[in-house]
Amino acid sequence: MAVVKTRIAAVSYLNTVPFIYGIRHADKLRAELLLAPPAECARNFIDKKADIALVPAGALSRMDDAEVISDYCIGAEKSVRTVTVMSNVPIGEVSVLWLDSHSMTSALLVKILAEELWHIRPRWKELTDYSVAEHPADGEGFLFIGDKVFGYEGKFRYTYDLADCWRELTGKPFVFAVWVARKGSAPELIDTLEESLELGVERIWEAIVESGHSEKEYAYTYLTENIDFLFDYQKRQALELFREKSKKFTPRSNPG
């Protein structure tokens, strides 16, 4: 049996636990895993430190040599829970919005929603020191992403799930990240990756147990009810719509 060796960059959040499990347990795949926040995953691929990467939707426009290779993704049909804006005032009264620095994709999504759904023009600030969220000033809102969101649940009066808000705006699901490889990559590499991802998605409970997550039932509910891993036709359409809407907000650097 031929074994495929490669370097894979993936996000280091709970929502990728099934993918990581599948990659580590695949019979025909031997991968060096580079686990990092979303923006760094994109950078690892751009810098050619990885052959395959799970990259944020907002980074695709800056990857000329990449192609989407998998029918799996990090997506949400409804509430995603781990990409939210929280505040102590209604969103229409938010005048300052702190943006989590770990994902430009979520920041782009917030800016689309601010303009097209919420009709607000807040002052944008980069959130790198999370202590500012412990004592928010009047009119401040905070974009939180990833596992850290769980720690803030219930601490603010208002929570806006961005996947829910995107569906309210467009009627579509949202795609946060997709798998890419360099154009012209070997078919056996792509096929082997797909098999490993399928394995992980089919064994979500085993993946959670192996990850050592302290609240297994909580994690299982999140991965089976909030995250949707299938990159189907509706999500492909949603991704293209997001890319089109985000063009006016997309920075020239800082992928993710």
Image (tube, rainbow, N blue to C red):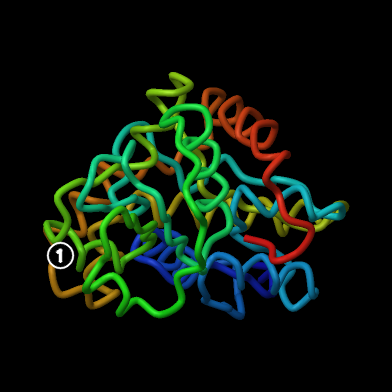
Outermost top residue? 171
Please tell me which residue lies in front, 55 or 115: 115
Q: Is residue 7 left or right of residue 199?
A: right
* Residue at (37% x, 64% y) in the render: 17
Residue at the spot 32% in from the left edge and 33% down from the top edge: 78
Local crowd size for mark 1, using a 10 Å CA cut-off: few (<14), some (14–19), many (≥20): some
Q: Mark 1: which secondary structure?
A: helix
Give the image location of residue 96, x and y in percent. Answer: 41, 55
Residue 111 versus residue 83 in the image, above or below: above
Residue denoted by label 1:
216
Who is closer to the viewer here, 69 or 29?
69
Q: Residue at x 23, y 51 (%)?
A: 222
- Three-letter code for the amino acid on which mark 1 is drawn: Lys
Count how many numbered circles sit on residues in the image: 1
Q: Quadrant of the C terminus?
A: bottom right
Rendering coords of residue 141 (x, y %): 33, 55
Taking the image as shown, residue 173 lies to the left or right of residue 216, namely right
Q: Position of residue 124 (x, y in %)?
A: 51, 57
Where's residue 206, x and y in %? 25, 63
Of the 4 image quadrants, the one containing the N terminus is bottom right
> Which residue is more in the foreground, 26 or 166?
166
Residue 214 horizontal side relative to residue 47, left or right:
left
- Which is more toward the observer, 95 or 33? 95
> Is residue 124 depicted above or below 49 in this figure?
above
| Residue drawn at 67 percent across, 65 percent down | 42
Q: Is residue 166 left or right of residue 209?
A: right
